[in-house]
Image (tube, rainbow, N blue to C red):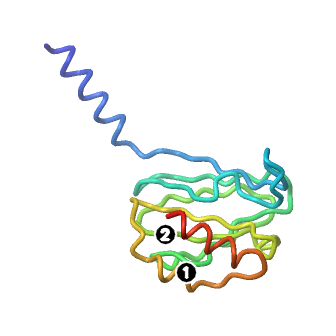
Amino acid sequence: MKLFTVMAILFISTSASAADMTIEMLNKDADGNKMVFSEEIARVDIGDIITWIPTTKGHNVEMISSPNDMKLKSKNGKEVKISFDKAGIYYYWCTPHKGMGMIGLVVVGNDTSNLDQIAKAKAMGKSKKKLKKLLAEL
């Protein structure tokens, strides 16, 4: 009985801990899509961490709209980590390639209550059409 209790505690504490996710900034993905993030819609829980890794020097992450008005613009070619402490949708792009549609969304806590805010956020070039497509997938 004691072994079962210890195993149950280990399972509960492991499943309750924050998760890590990695998103690559790509010039081209396996399907031939150019200037993309490896995950265009990331779904995480509150407290989870996402690490963006540039595969070449010309990419970055700039937060455009979020439930907490997060201010972030990483340097080109630099890895960036973000811990998500507030539920909602976060919209970001690669600054040099935003017009080519290099954008992504993070949905934290399965909360889409700020969808209207994200839909009204700035987008340009191919990002406009892609943002509508990604929001429709939520």
What residue is rendered at 20% in x and 17% in y? 4
In space, the residues marked 1 and 2 are separated at their CA atoms by 10 Å
Neighbour tally class for label 2: few under 14, some 14-19, many 20 plus, Cα within 10 Å? many
Residue at image x 76%, y 73%? 98
Residue 34 sits in which quadrant? bottom right
31 vs 82, nearest the viewer: 31
Tell me the number on the disc at residue 24: none
- Mark 1 neighbour class, 10 Å CA radius: few under 14, some 14 to 19, many 20 or more: some
Taking 102 as reference, is 8 above or below it? Answer: above
**Image quadrant where one finds the N terminus:** top left
In the image, taking residue 47 as reference, residue 6 lies left or right, namely left
Which amino acid does the dot numbered 2 rest on? Answer: Ile
Task: Return the disc, 1 or 2, that comes first in the chain's sequence.
Answer: 2
Residue on which the image places disc 2: 89
Return the x and y of residue 60 as percentages of the image width and height.
75, 64
Residue under the point 39% across and 74% down:
113
Q: Position of residue 100 (x, y in %)?
A: 81, 71
Locate residue 124: give its quadrant. Answer: bottom right
Q: Residue furthest left?
A: 1
Is 132 located above or below residue 26 in the figure? below
Residue 130 higher or lower than 116, as above or below: above
- The structure residue drawn at horizontal position 52% and vertical position 52%, both measured from the top left corner, is 49
Q: Position of residue 48 (x, y in %)?
A: 46, 52
Q: Name the residue tied to disc 1.
A: 119
Position of residue 102 in the picture relative to residue 109 (left or right): right
Amino acid type, mark 1: Ala
Residue 12 rendering spot, x and y as whole percentages: 28, 34
